[in-house]
Amino acid sequence: MAYPILFDAVLHPHRSLPPSGFTLLMVVFGGSSAAVGVAFLIQGAWPVLGFLGLEIGLVYLAFRINYRDAQVYETVRLTERALTVWRITRTHEPQSWSFEPAWVRVSMDDPPQHHSALRVSSHGHSLRIGAFLSPEERLELAHALRGALLAWRSGQTGVVRP
């Protein structure tokens, strides 16, 4: 039997550079490094060209790792029967945790600090969620989740989407 969804949030890490911007960045960076490398090559300092090539490769690799890590996401869903958190890791391995909503406690520093963690806990088990979000986004999620749990406990229903 499917229970109505009372709260539903899908959390994704923020990435400010779209793939087209990455391509443009690599073309500009590669072109400028090639121009500098040719200038050094003309002056007889040919080893600099190899180091510039290595630098371009490392920047490319760093961005590729960053984009791979952007595929991580979490889903937080509250139904009448459970608060469930699903996490898809960068290796695409799904993980899930389920909590009894009557006993769930949501904790977060207010005002948030950079190191503040958003945690849901129940019966001695605790789970950190939204670690890749900004402190303000974690606090907003904490308030929305607390509100949904309070509404559920008071008998009010309705889907909440932060």
Image (cartoon, grey):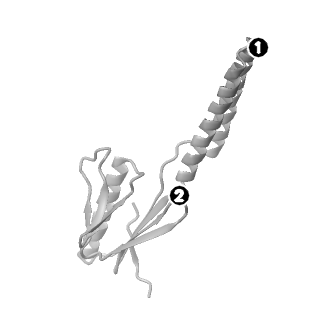
Neighbours of disc 1 within 10 Å: few (<14), some (14-19), many (20+): few
In which quadrant of the rendered view does residue 44 lie?
top right
Assess whether mark 2 and mark 1 are in contact (beta carbons under 8 angstroms). no
In which quadrant of the rendered view does residue 144 lie?
bottom left
Work out how far the residue at label 1 is from the one at label 2, CA to CA, in angstroms: 44 Å
Q: Is residue 143 above or below residue 112?
A: below
Q: Measured from the top left, where is residue 9 in percent x and y?
A: 42, 64
Drawn side of residue 20 relative to residue 75, left or right: right
Quadrant showing the N terminus: bottom left
Residue type marked 2: Arg
* Rendered residue at 68%/30% (across/down): 53
Residue closer to the observer: 5 or 75:
75
Q: Measured from the top left, where is residue 123 in percent x and y?
A: 24, 73
Q: Disc number at residue 90? A: 2
Q: Disc number at residue 70? A: none
* Rendered residue at 38%/47% (across/down): 134
Q: Residue at the far front: name it.
A: 47
* Rendered residue at 41%/82% (across/down): 3
| Secondary structure type for disc 2 | loop
Q: Is residue 45 above or below residue 11?
A: above
| Residue marked by disc 1 | 42
Q: Earlier in the sequence, mark 1 or mark 2?
A: 1
> Is residue 158 in view from this perspective?
no
Q: Measured from the top left, where is residue 132 in percent x and y?
A: 42, 51
Residue type marked 1: Ile
Residue closer to the observer: 58 or 106:
58
Q: Residue at the far right: name it.
A: 42
Q: Measured from the top left, where is residue 96 in percent x and y?
A: 43, 71
